[in-house]
Amino acid sequence: MAIAAVPDYLGRNFSTASPGLRFGMYLSIWNDDFSETKSDGKPSIKAKEKVEPLKKAGRLNPNDQATMKHLLVRQQAAFNTVTRAANGLQLDAITTAPFATGLGNEHPTENGFAFLNPYGLPYLPASGVKGVLRQAARELASGDWGESDWSGDYINTLFGSEPGSEKLRRGAFIFWDVIPQIKGDSLAVEIMTPHHTHYYQDQQTPHDSGQPTPISFLTVPAGSGFTFHVQCDFAMLSQAAPELAQDERWKTLLEEVFSHAFDWLGFGAKTSVGYGAMQEDQVKKIARERQQAEQQEQERRATLSPEDLAYEENKPVIDKFSETFEQARKATYQPGQEFDSKRNQFIQAAISWEETRSRLEAATVLGETLKWGVSKKGKDRLKAAVEQLQGKKG
C-alpha cells in the first residue's frame, strides 16, 4: 500500500490539511522505504495508483470551503476600497469545462498544480489572466475576427509594452489573482492518454502501434465560479490615451477581450484541447448591475436636500392621481362614483405634506377636477382644500 513520504510522528491522517499540502507534501504514492511505486521495473508510477491519492488530495474539507469563500469576500472588499466603480471592472464567470493550472510545476506525478500559499487552494495567477487577455486583444486588433477598436497602441497603453521594446512602460490595467469558487466539495481528477511515449520519452522509432499511457492530473471541475478583478489607472490612462478615458471606453474594450477569451481562448493549461473554457455568469451580472444601480441611487439621494427628497417621494402619488383623473374624465361624471373616494384619499395625503412644491402641484391637479368631477355639495369643500394647499408654506 502506497504511503506519504513523511515521518511517522506526523501520522497518516491528513484530512484536515489543505489540498495544497495534501498534493504537494502528503500524497500517498510511495513505498514503505519512500521510493516511488514501480510498474514492471519502470520508475514511473502506475496510473491506477495515482487516481485515488489524487482524489483524496483534492477533497475540500469544511475549513477549505470556508476559506475559499472568505478569500473572495476579502478580495472584493479590498477591490472596492482601492478602486471606485468607474475605475475598475469586476466580472463573474462560470467554467464550462474543467480548469487546469500549473501542470508544469515539479511534482512526483510529473503533473503539478498551482495552489495559492499559504492557503493551499487553487488559483489563477494575475499574470495568467493578463497573458490570455493580451492575446485576445492581439487577435482582435489583427482584424481577423471582424471590426474592432483594438490597435497595437491601445494594447501597449492598457497592457504595457512588450519585453525588449525600445520604450518600456507599464500598462494602465492592473490584474488581480482569481480565487475559484469550486463546485462541490472536491477537485476533479482528469486523465490524458499520450500515444507516443515510446518516441517522446524512450527515444524509440516513431510508429502508430505505441501503447497509450494514462496520466492523471487535478483540475477545477466545470461549473465552478471565477471572479475577475481588473483595476484601471485612470490618471495614467487620461494622459496616455485620453480618448479611452472618456465614456468608459476602456471598459468596453476590456469586456470585449474577456468575451473573446471566453469564447475562443480559455484560461489556464491545456486550453488547446478545451480546458479552461468559460462563460460570463449572467445571473451574477444582473444582480451586480442591480446592486450598482441601487448604490448609485443611494449616492444620488444623499446629495439631495430634505425638500427634494420629500418631493421625490410625493411625486409618484401626484402622478398616479393625475392618471386616475385622466381615465375617469373620459366618462360622464356621476356623484358618489369611485373617483370621489380616490380624490378624498389624495386630499388627505396632500394636506399632510409639508413640502411646498408637492402641495402646489397637488393643488393644481385638484383644481383641474373642479372643471369636471365634483358635485355641487362638494365643490366648496374641494375649493377650500385647494386654497389650503396653495396657502400653507412647507
Image: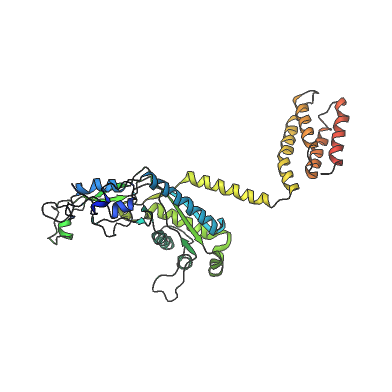
Q: Name the quarter where the C terminus is drawn.
A: top right
Residue 138 screen position, x and y as percent: 41, 63
Camera-side residue: 330 or 39? 39
Judged left or right of residue 93, residue 299 is right
Camera-side residue: 273 or 119? 119
**View extreme (front): residue:** 9
* Figure check: 100 above or below 237: above
Judged left or right of residue 72, residue 334 is right
Q: Residue at x 85, y 32 (%)?
A: 382
Residue 265 visible within the image? yes
Judged left or right of residue 114, residue 6 is left
Camera-side residue: 95 or 59? 59
Q: Residue at x 59, y 48 (%)?
A: 293
* Figure check: 175 above or below 314: below
Residue 205 screen position, x and y as percent: 12, 60
Residue 279 visible within the image? no
Residue 117 screen position, x and y as percent: 37, 57
Residue 223 screen position, x and y as percent: 38, 44
